Amino acid sequence: MSRRKKERLITYADGAYLVARVDAIRKFGFNGRPFIDEVFMYTDDVMLSLRLWNHGQKVAYFPIEAGIHLTSLTARKTGAISYYPLRGRFITHAFIKTRYFRLKYFYYLRVKMMLQILCMFISKKYCNAYSAVTDGYNLGRKLAKLYGYLSLYKAPYLKLDNFTLISRIFLPIRSMKKVL
């Protein structure tokens, strides 16, 4: 049986098909709400799920067909498809603690400087990515001050081998292609 057909605990539930207990959201959500307005898209479901795990709740996957999700329809219509996914990634870098948390600031600086140089000298299309990275990291730090850091280790997660981890820190270009 494939993993998609089995019930199992997961790190986070995708917001497109998220069902939650109201009492858990009121008690453990962000000021009694499931999401933070400033976050808006591509990260709020991750943050809610990790917050629930951090407060002893569980997040599970149930293989039920409940509807059709038109992927990125809102973002495509608004032109935000290149901004919000990258912004969300850097919100989580600043807001979620992992054992590599101290290295994330150097990763952020490296990506930020690379995008700033590309924006100034190569193409203005990199300016949007630069804004997404800086906006995301700054918002993540603000949220960490408001709500405290979230720990990845209270949820089930996939461990990366050292080669993959180092390549993602020092060679983020392959993930940037989707943004540009």
Image (cartoon, rainbow, N blue to C red):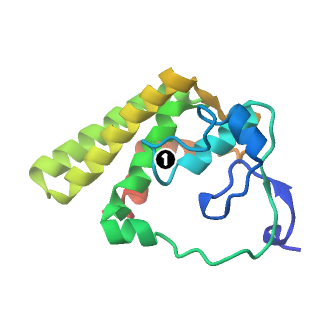
Q: Residue 13 is drawn in which quadrant?
A: bottom right
What residue lies at 34% left-to-right and 71% top-to-bottom? 77
Q: Which one is nearer the viewer's eye here, 29 or 48? A: 29
Q: Which one is nearer the viewer's eye here, 65 or 110? A: 65
Task: Give the image location of residue 122, x and y in percent.
Answer: 13, 56
Task: Give the image location of residue 163, x and y in percent.
Answer: 58, 46
Q: Residue 38 is drawn in which quadrant?
A: top left
Task: Give the image location of residue 168, x and y in percent.
Answer: 49, 47
What residue lies at 47% left-to-right and 53% top-to-bottom? 41
Say whether residue 161 is visible.
no
Please name the amino acid that badge 1 sits on. Answer: Arg
How many discs mark residues in the rendered view?
1
In this picture, is 91 found above or below 15? above
In this picture, is 59 found above or below 70? above
Q: Would residue 147 be found to the left or right of residue 7 on screen? A: left
In this picture, is 166 found above or below 65? above
Say whether residue 150 is visible.
yes
- Describe the element under mark 1 as helix, strand or loop: helix
Task: Give the image location of residue 73, x and y in percent.
Answer: 44, 72
Q: Which one is nearer the viewer's eye here, 16 or 156? A: 16
What residue lies at 63% left-to-right and 42% top-to-bottom? 48
Placement of the N terminus among the 4 image quadrants = bottom right
* Mark 1 Cα shell of 10 Å, populated few (<14), some (14-19), many (≥20): some
What residue lies at 72% left-to-right and 38% top-to-bottom? 52
Pick out the residue farthest to the left: 121
Name the residue carrying label 1.
168
